[in-house]
Amino acid sequence: MHFLNVGCGYRHCKDNLWTNLDLQSPDKAVLQWDITQGIPFQDGQFDAVYHSHLFEHLSRTDGMRFIEECFRVLRPGGVLRVVVPDLEEICQSYLHILQRARSGDSLSQRRYCWIMLEMYDQAVRTESGGTMAEYLGKEGIQDKEFIISRIGSVGRDLLSKSTNTRARYAGTSEPRSVLKRCAAMLMGTSPTLREAMISRALGKEDRKALKIGRFVLGGELHKWMYDSYSLGLVLAQAGFNDVQRCSPTQSNIPGWSKYFLDVDPDGFIHSPCSLYMEGIK
């Protein structure tokens, strides 16, 4: 058996059955690769491919190509497991909280700010962590249990600490820009000197635009969202059969419960308000 965990982040599986893949990682056990360039493995090499909270960071076009790549590297009978934020659940929760907040319910009025951030912030932020990180970094946050129930172990870990919240909540590391790569090739200068040269050459607004552009290209933004209907259509279009919605603990991947990818060893669900779907090649 051979399994692939794509966009693993810090939740890479150390079991020798798994290959872990991510854009950048300090861990030598993780293969670094940009998945917009395809998946760097031969056809039919894996019995399962898993990715969690990765797919929504791709455009619809790149996302379709990526799912087709997942199909390609799976053997016949192999399983694709996709975990994404559940658009339908988020919308339903937003509408429920909005209705109760309008009626004067104080609890819903407190929760309204968070549900708006959860739904929209990661699609529009211009710096890592965005307004959500600012919110989580505040002292005396009310209704922490509600936030943890929404974003799981990420929220639990962040709210249990009070420093460097923005840095810990950041999605992916900033990539080297085209301008930086060109500067490195042409001048062979250090990163610090290159930055100084770029800052000196650009005006204030251009520096701001460059900073935002780097962030947008860094992969942290949500570029599309999915419900079970739309994600099912994507998997079916790529050629997958028996497409079904699963729970965090339910999977067609053999031995799923022992890998602790969607559920922590203490039984805590890593990302409770997620959509879990699988298809078979």
Image (cartoon, rainbow, N blue to C red):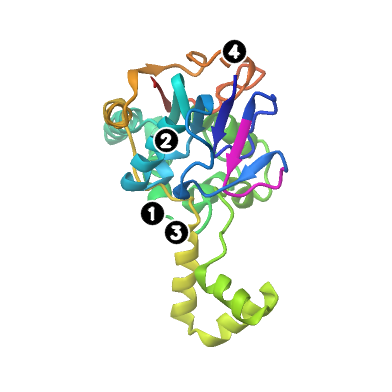
Q: Residues within 10 Å of mark 1 (few under 14, many from 20)?
A: few
The residue lying toward the viewer, choosing from 239 and 10, is 239
- Which residue, given by chain and number where applicable, does mark 3 sit on? 216
Q: Please identify the quadrant where the C terminus is shown.
A: top left
Please state which of residues 50 and 207 is positioned toward the viewer in this rendering: 50
Residue at 66% x, 40% y: name it: 30
Label 1 – label 3 distance at C-alpha: 9 Å
Q: Are marks 3 and 4 in contact (CB under 8 Å)?
A: no
Mark sitting earlier along the chain (4/2) = 2
Q: CA distance from mark 3 to mark 4?
A: 37 Å
* Label 1 SS: helix
Callout 3 secondary element = helix
Mark 4 → mark 2, Cα distance in angstroms = 38 Å
Q: Tell me the magenta residue range.
A: 19-27
The answer, for residue 113, to whether it is visible in the render is no
Residue 23 magenta: yes
Q: Which residue is mark 2?
A: 111
In the picture, residue 229 is in which quadrant?
top left
> Which amino acid type is marked by label 3?
Val
Circle on res. 255: 4
Q: Label 3: how many residues lie within 10 Å, few (<14), some (14-19) or many (20+)?
A: some
In percent of the image, x 50 and y 41: which residue is there? 39
What kind of residue is marked 2? Arg
108 or 271: nearer the eye? 271
For residue 227, side relative to residue 266 (left or right): left
Query: In front of the other: label 1 or label 3?
Result: 3
- The local crowd at label 4, few if under 14, some if 14 to 19, many if 20 or more residues have their Cα within 10 Å, is few
